[in-house]
Amino acid sequence: MSQVILSGIRATGRLHFGNFLGAVQNFVKFQEQIDATCMYFVADWHTLTTLKDPEVLRSNLIEMIKDYIAAGLDPNKSIIYTQSSIPEIAELALYLSMFQPINELNLIPTYKELVRKNPDQVSLGLLSYPILMAADILGPRATMIPVGEDQIPNVELARSLAQRFNRRFGEIFVIPEMMEQMIKVPGLDGNKMGKSDNNSIEIGAPMNIIGKLYMKKGITDPERKHLMDLGDPYNRCKSVYGIHELITQDEKDLRVIANKCMKAEISCVECKKILVESIAKILIPFQEKRKELTDKDDYVSEILYEGGKRARSIIAKTVAVVRDKMGIVLYS
Ligand code: ADP
Ligand code: TRP
């Protein structure tokens, strides 16, 4: 069976370094596999669960596609589209919802977290978020879903919905897998980098700003109060060493940084400087490419129309089978 790699990101704003490393860089790697169909989309319906300003949503979406392309996604190698261009996804979510116990939805950690933060803004759309996500995944019969760690429960739910449906109707859906190695990119405070957590690095930010942010807010080993205190990069420096570990290509360079920290031969400021240089190596080429796309909204629309058509023809085939299995006949 040929591979179908699929992933999406909500249009909540420009990408940050967490979703750039944790998700988009993997999207780009997979697109080089010749025997795989790669499908990457912006989950604009999912965005509506938290973002209410239509103008902001429209503009975020276009800017994010520019980020995708500048990061290396190639419309000739990947199908790039928006979720809402494919009404069959919403239709499939409706069919899938018939197989989904509500209790399980109440237990999804990302949902619980949002309920905890905003108990008075809990909509049905938010509760059923994972069902729509399952439709995103099962519609194109995706085999592999590259996402960050936080999305595991949602993908698990898609897997179990597919299994339930298949038990009832036969092998209609493919059971999607997750990547073996998922990463969690730490933010400035050492917790998972996230848009709404005030700890993220915007991938479009100038290098001097990124440098200042790390100098001011990047939390290093809290027990290394003086230069001569020995550091513990592995266990106590989640924010700065945590990123070194993810982006320093050469194992030897990484060990040198860790050893110097443990022997107090390098200060946290120096360590942050090295980090910002490594980040610059990744982000400057991205930013240069991104600048070329600034006023290319028409080009982005063309990519999305083309991608939307291709994705829709794939998804519509699955949904036609599902309709048939469930006894639905269209009379229009
Ligand atoms: P955010 O959590 O900032 O709102 P999104 O929910 O839009 O980010 O995430 C989009 C994709 O990026 C998902 O696959 C998610 O798992 C991944 N991702 C987001 N933040 C991180 C992070 N800090 N580390 C690794 N992956 C991440
Ligand atoms: N829930 C994902 C996130 O917050 C976005 C998403 C929606 C997604 N549908 C998907 C990711 C399907 C992978 C596959 O990042």
Image: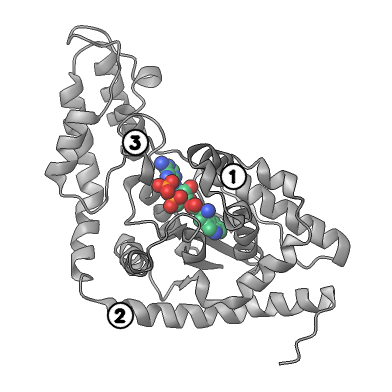
What residue is shown with label 3?
187
Depth check: 230 or 224 in front?
224
Name the quarter where the C terminus is drawn: bottom right
The kind of residue on which mark 3 rests is Gly
Q: Is residue 1 in view?
A: no
Depth check: 203 or 86 in front?
86
Q: Are marks 1 and 2 in contact (CB under 8 Å)?
A: no
Q: Residue at x 42, y 60 (%)?
A: 52
Whether residue 270 sits left or right of residue 34 in the image: it is left
Q: Is residue 166 in view?
A: yes
The residue at label 3 has a CB less than 8 Å from ligand 1: yes
Q: Mark number for residue 152? A: 1
Q: Position of residue 2 (x, y in %)?
A: 64, 67
N-terminal of the pair, mark 1 or mark 3, is 1
What residue is shown with label 2?
299
The answer for how far apart the CA atoms under marks 1 and 2 are is 34 Å
The answer for how far apart the CA atoms under marks 2 and 3 are is 33 Å
Q: Residue furthest bottom?
A: 332
The kind of residue on which mark 2 rests is Tyr
The answer for how far apart the CA atoms under marks 1 and 3 are is 20 Å
Quadrant hosting residue 3: bottom right
